[in-house]
Image (tube, grey):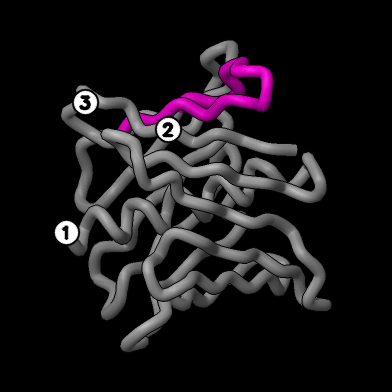
């Protein structure tokens, strides 16, 4: 399953549309005014299904993931010099990016591919293609990409 993750061009807060391969909107993400990033995820019908919340008083960037109001895990940026690395607290998953921060791989605890993420560089706004192996993992992969993109925006 492929998802196209596209940031909206004119928005005061982080806003994204997530499409399937046929161009149908699967999710909408809307940023809210808060201490740190707060990104709410809505399904195609406009129902909130989860959110990402940045923890402001953390040494390095940390984001918590929620489905509904239930905590499901977190992603923490690790200190590295060259390749971006994140520590995940979600079912033993691991994520690592390339030096340019354009390509990421997500693996499960056994080292099996969960998803690959590629940034499309010739767009006006942040655009990613998320290739998810199992559709049930799509929302979690999306949450991770949202957190990574928010962390990158905080740095710039």
- Mark 1: which secondary structure? loop
Q: Is residue 2 left or right of residue 15?
A: right
Looking at the figure, which quarter contains the C terminus? bottom left
Q: Is residue 108 left or right of residue 10?
A: right
Residue sitting at x 63%, y 73% = 94
Residue sitting at x 42%, y 32% = 6
Question: Closer to the camera, 59 or 109?
Answer: 109
Distance from the alpha carbon under mark 1 to that under mark 2: 18 Å
Residue sitting at x 27%, y 34% = 124
Circle 3 residue: 11
Circle 1 residue: 156
Circle 2 residue: 6
- Image disc number at residue 102: none
Tag 2 or tag 1, which sits nearer the N-term? 2
Magenta stretch, residue numbers: 15-28
- Mark 3: which secondary structure? loop
Distance from the alpha carbon under mark 2 to that under mark 3: 13 Å
């Amino acid at each position: 399953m492929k998802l196209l993750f596209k940031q909206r061009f004119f928005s005061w807060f982080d806003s994204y549309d997530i499409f399937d391969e046929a161009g149908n909107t699967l999710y909408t993400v809307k940023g809210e005014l808060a201490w740190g990033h707060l990104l709410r995820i809505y399904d195609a019908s406009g129902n909130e299904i989860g959110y990402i919340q940045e923890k402001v008083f953390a040494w390095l960037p940390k984001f918590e993931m929620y489905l509904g109001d239930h905590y499901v895990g977190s992603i923490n940026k690790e200190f590295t010099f060259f390749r971006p690395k994140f520590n995940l607290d979600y079912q033993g998953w691991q994520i690592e990016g390339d030096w340019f921060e354009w390509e990421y791989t997500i693996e499960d605890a056994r080292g099996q591919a969960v998803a690959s993420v590629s940034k499309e560089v010739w767009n006006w706004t942040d655009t990613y293609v998320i290739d998810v192996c199992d559709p049930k993992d799509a929302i979690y992969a999306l949450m991770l990409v949202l957190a990574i993109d928010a962390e990158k925006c905080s740095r710039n």
